[in-house]
Image: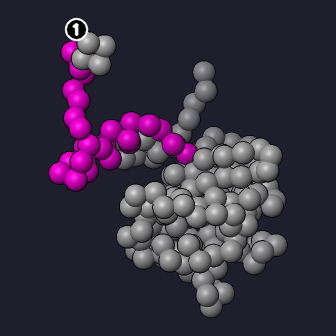
Amino acid sequence: MPEHDKIKAVADSFVPGPENPRALRDALGRFATGVTIVTARDADGAGVGITVNSFASVSLDPPLVLWSVAKSSNRHDLFAAADAFAIHVLGADQAGLCARFARQGAGFDGLAHGIGAAGVPLIAEALVVFECETEAHHPGGDHTILIGRVTRVILGADRAPLVFSQGAFGRFVAG
């Protein structure tokens, strides 16, 4: 039996394609991620934000991080044009913020927030905030990958992070 067929004998498999995007999305959902809100300013200086779980570190020297935004998002062009942004890593007690910055959420309406060094809105109480200058954009299929150079890190209270897996929010418990 060929090596690649051995795993098929114990698990379902499929070839991802345009006819089964939900199956691929569900498979990717088995990878637990942290949850972030990315904020920036629009052309008029108003704060914008989006809930994101595609955050990753890229490099320590220079300090680079990445995240991606769907080209179909109504906020795609705002973030693609931004020269700075902030990535807020959420705590387990902040799941409610995700809905505020989802597709039809209230965003900054009625939400107390500060302003960072680059004029980007900063959400209070995040586990950690990475203030970034936009370093690069890269096409990534139906997304745009944004690379940010970290210019400042703000550490919040040390507590459990918010985790997203298989379509649900939860918390990480070590041990």
Q: Indicate the position of residue 14 as horizontal and vertical percent values.
A: 22, 35
Split into 4 quadrants, where in the image is the N terminus?
top left
Kind of residue indicated by mark 1:
Met
Which residue is at the far front? 2
Provide the residue designation for mark 1.
1
| 104 is higher (above) or lower (below) than 61 | below
Membership of 170 in magenta stretch: no
Q: Which residues are magenta?
A: 6-34
Left or right: 84 as drawn, with respect to 71: right
Q: How is the image coloured?
A: one colour
Q: Quadrant of residue 124?
A: bottom right
Q: Residue at x 23, y 38 (%)?
A: 15
Q: Residue at x 42, y 41 (%)?
A: 165
Q: Indicate the position of residue 108 as horizontal and vertical percent values.
A: 58, 77
Q: Quadrant of residue 132?
A: bottom right
Split into 4 quadrants, where in the image is the C terminus?
top right
Say which of 48 and 83 sits in front: 83
Q: Residue at x 30, y 44 (%)?
A: 24
| 159 is higher (above) or lower (below) than 110 | above
